[in-house]
Amino acid sequence: MSQTPSVCRIVAVVGFEARNNGTDVAPAIITRVWGERPDGAWTVNLRVFPDAGIERNATSILLWPDEDTARQAIEGNSLATAAHWPARV
């Protein structure tokens, strides 16, 4: 992964924890970094801010380098959540 997560960095969340107001993407702030896994993902805790919803904690979420990889990681599991670095624009 080209970026190393740290507390207070902003990431994007996809999946269950992000669902609100017709979207499945939400911003989140890293609140704890657990470590890097052999597959290149990082395990982190997040504070998720869904659109028009109440913010909430998400623990032990896998952080991937991009949205496509994050979505592949949760494909087929409607209760799963993954995070990724936002695209640079």
Image: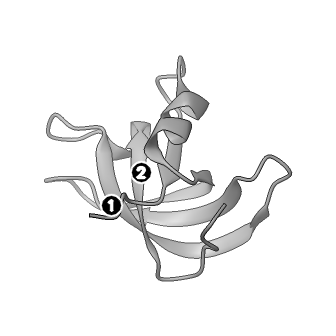
Give the mark count. Answer: 2
Q: Which structural element holds mark 1?
A: strand
Number of other residues with Cα within 10 Å of mark 1, as a class: few under 14, some 14 to 19, many 20 or more: many
Q: Residue at x 22, y 41 (%)?
A: 20
Measured along the vertical axis of the image, is residue 12 above or below residue 78?
below
Quadrant for the C terminus in the image: bottom left
Q: Is residue 34 left or right of residue 52?
A: right
Residue beneath label 1, please?
27
Identified by mark 2, the residue type is: Val
Front-lying residue, 54 or 20:
20
Q: How is the image coloured?
A: one colour
Q: Position of residue 58 (x, y in %)?
A: 51, 56
- Which is more N-terminal, label 1 or label 2? 2
What residue is shown with label 2?
A: 13
Relative horizontal placement of residue 87, taking residue 68 as reference (left or right): left
Give the residue drawn at x 67%, y 72%.
33
- Badge 2 marks a residue whose secondary structure is strand
User: Looking at the image, is 63 positioned above or below residue 70?
Assistant: below
User: Dot 2: within a 10 Å radius of its alpha carbon, few (fewer than 14), some, or many (20 or more) residues?
Assistant: many
Amino acid at the residue labelled 1: Pro
Residue at left 62%, top 75%? 32
Q: Position of residue 70 (x, y in %)?
A: 53, 41
Give the alpha-carbon distance from disc 2 to disc 1, as whole Å: 6 Å
- Counting from the top left corner in percent of width and height, residue 50 is at 26, 53
Looking at the image, do the residues carrying marks 2 and 1 touch, with CB atoms under 8 Å apart? Answer: yes
